């Protein structure tokens, strides 16, 4: 069943940049609805209103796609939590929540699968296990109604290819993006650029990268991918300031903090301006699907949408700093001491 909220993925990609927004698991963990460590989206069944609210915040901020929150909602993970019996309900409900909000603003609905931690390239039997996990998740998603599949945070090219195959068996377009925790290659040893070329060769509608890297360290890699593949390209970085010495959020270090990832990343957060700059830089490189992953907030998504030349519903409340009592037009009448204290240049 297709969703029918206006043009499909291919038409939207042909018409210009598609803006994605993810990072649901991190944001809902911050809000107290998901347990860090397990990172299973129990919130879908336990507090569906919280999921709906975040979908709506991203929609109002200008996101073109509502991604069903089924990240880690697969058999292996639910078994660990003793909630295997909730598997189907959780997957179906996640798609329903995304669909309901998508229909409020003409957005696309994406079904979502991710790395399973069940795949082992050295053990061929795991291919069938992962195929079965993806087939049941995406089968339920397809029955509930999605426009396309996002297979993401893939550490292994082999596992990504299974998701692509299942999507094709269901007749759904697939966007397949790789995790990039290693300097140059997937965990099964494929150079990231080569892996994207292979995915494109197998018929993925969109290939690229998501998660792990922030804008600064994802852009150079995505530029090489853009140069080498013919299909649409996606870039959805984490909203953290990664660098050459710490190219991923997992490798970030801070003095006096024993472990930055995943619970003490806050000081590395990108500002809305940095994410806006990323959106423009990615578009200018020829990236077709520009988005954001872990660490995302609606303020950054809105800034990205506006930097891409759009007005989002939430733009009604975008900053008007001229109205600020010290930093705005009233500054001219303020005491110089006050202006100095507020770091206002006269
Ligand atoms: Zn992420």
Image: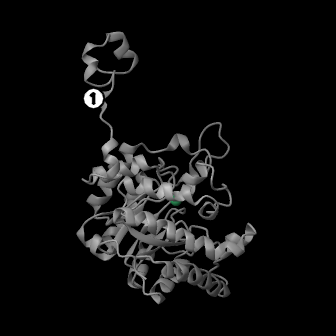
**What residue is shown at x 39% (from left), y 84% (from top)?**
203
> Where, quadrant-wise, is the C terminus in this rendering?
top left
The image position of residue 222, as x and y in percent, is: 38, 63
Quadrant for the N terminus in the image: bottom left
Residue found at the very far bottom of the displayed protein: 169
40 lies left or right of 66: right
Q: Where 101 falls versus 269 (above or below)?
A: below
Question: Exactly how many numbered labels are in the figure?
Answer: 1
Q: Nearer the viewer, residue 1 or 199?
A: 1
**Secondary structure at numbered mark 1:** helix
In front here: 278 or 180?
A: 278
Residue picked out by circle 1: 322
Q: Residue at x 41, y 71 (%)?
A: 193
In this rendering, position of residue 239 left or right of residue 321: right
Foreground of the two, 333 or 261: 333
Based on the displayed image, in which of its 4 quarters is residue 287 positioned?
bottom left
In the rendered image, is residue 229 in sight? no
Relative to 334, is 35 above or below?
below
Q: Position of residue 19 (x, y in %)?
A: 35, 61
Query: How far across and how far down the image is residue 67, in percent?
Result: 46, 66
Label 1 packing within 10 angstroms: few (<14), some (14-19), many (20+): few
Residue at horizontal 43%, vertical 50%? 298
**Would you say 282 lies left or right of 195 here?**
left
- Which residue is depicted at the point 42% across and 70% down? 109
């Amino acid at each position: 069943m297709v969703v029918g909220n206006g043009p499909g993925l291919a038409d939207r990609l042909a018409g210009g940049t598609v803006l994605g927004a993810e990072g649901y698991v991190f944001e809902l963990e911050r809000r107290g609805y998901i347990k860090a460590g397990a990172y299973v989206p129990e919130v879908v069944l336990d507090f569906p209103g919280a999921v709906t609210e975040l979908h709506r915040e991203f929609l109002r901020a200008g996101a073109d796609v509502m991604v069903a929150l089924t990240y880690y909602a697969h058999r292996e993970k639910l078994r660990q939590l003793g909630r295997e019996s909730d598997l189907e309900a959780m997957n179906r409900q996640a798609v329903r929540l995304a669909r309901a909000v998508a229909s409020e603003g003409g957005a696309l609905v994406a079904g979502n699968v991710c790395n399973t931690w069940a795949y082992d390239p050295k053990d061929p039997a795991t291919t069938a296990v992962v195929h079965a996990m993806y087939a049941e998740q995406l089968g339920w998603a397809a029955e509930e109604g999605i426009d396309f599949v996002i297979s993401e945070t893939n550490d292994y090219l082999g596992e990504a290819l299974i998701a692509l195959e299942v999507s094709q068996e269901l007749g759904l377009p697939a966007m397949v993006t790789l995790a990039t925790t290693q300097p140059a290659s997937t965990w099964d040893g494929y150079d990231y650029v080569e892996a994207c070329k292979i995915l494109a060769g197998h018929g993925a509608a969109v290939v690229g990268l998501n998660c792990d890297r922030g804008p600064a360290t994802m852009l150079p890699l995505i530029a090489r991918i853009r140069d080498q593949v013919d299909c649409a390209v996606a870039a959805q970085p984490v909203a953290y300031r990664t660098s050459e010495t710490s190219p991923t959020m997992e490798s970030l270090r801070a003095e006096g903090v024993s472990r930055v990832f995943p619970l003490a990343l806050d000081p590395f957060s990108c500002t809305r301006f940095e994410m806006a700059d990323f959106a423009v830089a990615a578009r200018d490189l020829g990236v077709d699907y520009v988005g954001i992953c872990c660490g995302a907030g609606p303020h950054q998504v809105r800034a990205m949408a506006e930097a891409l030349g759009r007005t989002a519903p939430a733009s009604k409340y975008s900053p008007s700093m001229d109205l600020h009592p010290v930093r705005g037009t009233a500054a001219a009448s303020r005491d110089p001491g006050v202006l100095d204290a507020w770091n206002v240049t006269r």
